[in-house]
């Protein structure tokens, strides 16, 4: 059975508004932490990209971008975003200044998407769970990759914010976030988008906070409530006081009284395979497609 075209509880208007929201000068701490764990997974991949794409680098992790640049120092880098101004801003933050030698010795950083079928790696960290049309996005990534190129991505899973969801439910409040997609459904969507050999895994990260205010500040860095049935309109000081009181119920004695919140992180890795010709009574194959089918695979071994 095919996966739904859109996460059922995600509001596409709210998702578009969040995507256009200006990102900060620094990427969220949790995003950088997840990116560092994705970087460890690259140790199992022997292919050395000579072109790679960083999708939404401002939110995905600027520190991770630098680590990737050092891992692939000779590779052409593309910074891609649905919001071009955010990609341009990321470029201004990650490229060397004009007086630095690296500015003239390293491959030029480009903004936008590479020519179709040219990139050997596409890196998308903590993004898919905010997409109103994830299948379309996966197909876009598939088109950007060369044959035998690979996708590395991460996103939030369904067990994220379980403590907060439970607390909201006890108060009879609407959900604090939309429903996040299970890793098995992501695997199915990768196959539908044309990828092969998807490898999915997950882990849970528990964060603790000294105060409700600190928890709220970090949650606002990570995103917004995109649920279609979220609270409507503005809420006043009384509601905020009630919210802070509710968050205090998340304090755990075993954590020294600190507030505790769980995040399920889903990791995905998949390849773009050789194209297959559709067989019929009469089949036509273009010259470029024939050359691509006969090309010797670059080969990736010891995959995740």
Image (tube, rainbow, N blue to C red):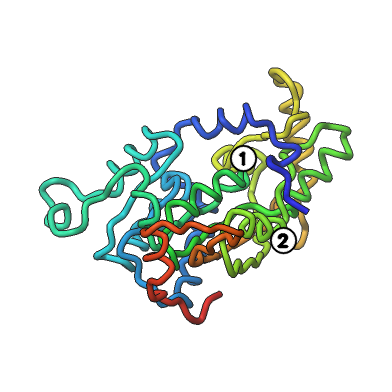
> Which disc, if any, is residue 184?
2
Q: Secondary structure at mark 1?
A: loop
Q: How many numbered discs?
A: 2
The picture quadrant where one finds residue 299 is bottom left
Query: Looking at the image, which is closer to me, 116 or 303?
Result: 116
Q: Secondary structure at mark 2?
A: helix
CA gap between label 2 and label 1 equals 17 Å
Left or right, 148 with reference to 78: right
Q: Quadrant of the C terminus?
A: bottom right
Q: Earlier in the sequence, mark 2 or mark 1?
A: 1
Q: Which residue is mark 1?
A: 133
Residue 85 in percent (x, y) is at: 36, 32
Query: Looking at the image, which is closer to me, 294 or 41?
Result: 294
**Residue, x 21% and y 57% (percent of image)?**
107
Is residue 189 depicted above or below 216 in this figure?
Answer: below
Kindly tell me whether residue 294 is visible in this rendering.
yes
Is residue 286 depicted above or below 173 in this figure?
Answer: below
> Which disc, if any, is residue 106?
none
Left or right, 225 with reference to 127: right
């Amino acid at each position: 059975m095919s996966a739904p075209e859109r996460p059922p509880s995600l509001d596409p208007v709210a998702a578009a508004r969040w995507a256009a929201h200006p990102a900060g000068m620094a990427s969220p701490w949790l995003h950088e932490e997840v990116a560092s764990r994705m970087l460890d997974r690259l140790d199992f991949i022997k292919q050395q990209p000579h072109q790679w794409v960083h999708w939404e680098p401002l939110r995905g992790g600027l520190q991770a971008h630098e680590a990737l640049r050092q891992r692939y120092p000779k590779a052409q880098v593309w910074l891609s975003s649905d919001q071009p101004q955010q990609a341009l801003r990321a470029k201004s933050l990650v490229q060397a200044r004009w007086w630095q030698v690296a500015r003239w010795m390293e491959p030029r950083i480009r903004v936008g998407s590479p020519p179709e079928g040219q990139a050997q790696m596409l890196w998308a960290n903590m993004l898919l769970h905010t997409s109103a049309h994830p299948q379309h996005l996966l197909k876009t990534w598939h088109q950007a990759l060369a044959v035998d190129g690979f996708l590395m991505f991460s996103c939030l899973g369904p067990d994220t914010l379980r403590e907060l969801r439970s607390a909201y439910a006890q108060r009879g409040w609407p959900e604090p976030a939309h429903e996040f997609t299970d890793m098995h459904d992501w695997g199915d969507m990768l196959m539908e988008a044309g990828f092969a050999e998807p490898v999915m895994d997950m882990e849970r990260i528990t964060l603790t906070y000294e105060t409700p205010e600190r928890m709220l500040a970090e949650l606002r860095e990570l995103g917004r409530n995109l649920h279609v049935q979220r609270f409507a309109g503005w809420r006043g000081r009384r509601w905020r006081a009630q919210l802070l009181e509710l968050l205090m119920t998340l304090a755990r004695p075993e954590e020294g009284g600190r507030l505790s919140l769980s995040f399920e992180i889903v990791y995905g890795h998949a390849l773009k395979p050789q194209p297959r010709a559709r067989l019929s009574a009469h089949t036509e194959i273009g010259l470029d497609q024939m050359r691509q089918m006969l090309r010797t695979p670059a080969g990736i071994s010891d995959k995740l």
